[in-house]
Amino acid sequence: MKKNKSIGYLLREGIRSIFRHGFMSFAAICVTVACLIIMGSFSLILYNLNMMVRELEQENEILVYVDENLTEAEAKSVGSKINLIDNVNKSEFVSREQALENFIENQDDDSVFAGIDSTTLRHRFVVTLVDNAQMETTVEAIRPIEGVADISAPYELEEGFRSLEHVLQIVTIAIIAILLVVSLFIISNTIKLAMLDRRDEIAIMKIVGATDSFIRLPFVVEGFVIGIVSAAIAFGLQWGLYDLLVRNVQAADSLKMIHFVPFRDALWVMIPAFAIAGLFVGVFGSLMSIRKFLDV
């Protein structure tokens, strides 16, 4: 019972100290919010870049050419067998005539190709995959299907997208880690300034026999509250700033070339990221700051 009362007292002291040293607590919250918004902004930029790369990657298509001796009906039946492959998302049939028409439309001078007979081309299927990383395996699974004459797969382009995605992941982790360390350093020094006013109090508690954990807990509680409040404020501001930026960019982008991921779609990433970062910076920053003052 006595232990519970002691813990309750320490928790109350931690919360009271926030209001007792209001200006420094306010400064710590402001600095934490600013750091979290910077981290969140970089994270959202890199998250959007990753999504753009994945969207472009999904546009990679495999062309499956059908045996030229098959009729159109027989050629279409090949598609049902292709769709049975696990990694195939869908296969779209393109007849000889449609393939020729598409080819001519993409040329600068279509009159040059006006006399070409569609029989010079083959029926084909445009195949999209669920996971392009398994493109080579999927191609090998399609190749033995009866009626398949040839397959054209953009292996090099897919490899390029995978390399770019890997680089973006490394850059994301590196930037967030650097910003987290910088934020931790700033918060630690901000809280340390607040503790300068309380060093005599800490020294007296040490002299009368208070344990390090007894002294440390109120500061941990203080850091916890500062971290969670800062995370909530930063999250709200980040959402508002992001939506404002998206609206302004979309209004200026008349060609609709830039696509942003809606903030709501990134909530599953942003909510835990802000919460964990805020708590880590607040609590660990407090622990780092008080360590010096405990050496009395």
Image (spheres, helix red, strand yellow):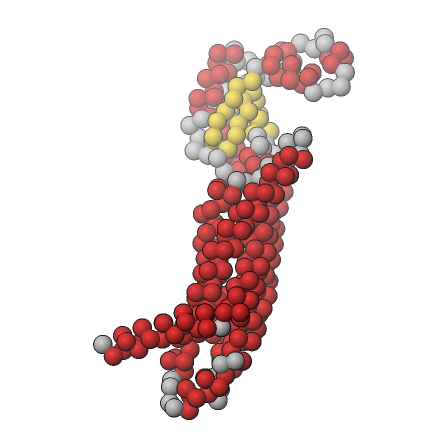
Quarter the N terminus occupies: bottom left
| Among the 4 quarters of the image, the one containing residue 187 | bottom right
Residue 230 location, x and y as percent?
A: 49, 60
Say how many tags the image has. Answer: 0
Q: Judge from the rendering whether residue 205 lies leftward or rightward of residue 71; answer left or right.
A: left
Residue 266 location, x and y as percent?
A: 49, 45
What residue is drawn where x is 56% and y is 76%? 193
Of 154 and 291, the residue lying toward us: 291
**Residue extending furthest left?**
1
205 w.r.t. 259: above or below = below
| Among the 4 quarters of the image, the one containing residue 39 | bottom right
9 w.r.t. 59: above or below = below
Of 89 and 175, the residue lying toward us: 175
Of 222 and 36, the residue lying toward us: 222
| Among the 4 quarters of the image, the one containing residue 196 | bottom right
Residue 134 location, x and y as percent?
A: 51, 39
Residue 3 location, x and y as percent?
A: 27, 78
Q: Is residue 204 visible?
A: yes
What residue is drawn where x is 54% and y is 22%? 125
What residue is drawn where x is 70% and y is 10%? 116
What residue is drawn where x is 31% and y is 73%? 8
Q: Is residue 184 visible?
A: no
172 w.r.t. 99: above or below = below
Of 159 and 17, the residue lying toward us: 17
**Residue extending furthest bottom?**
207
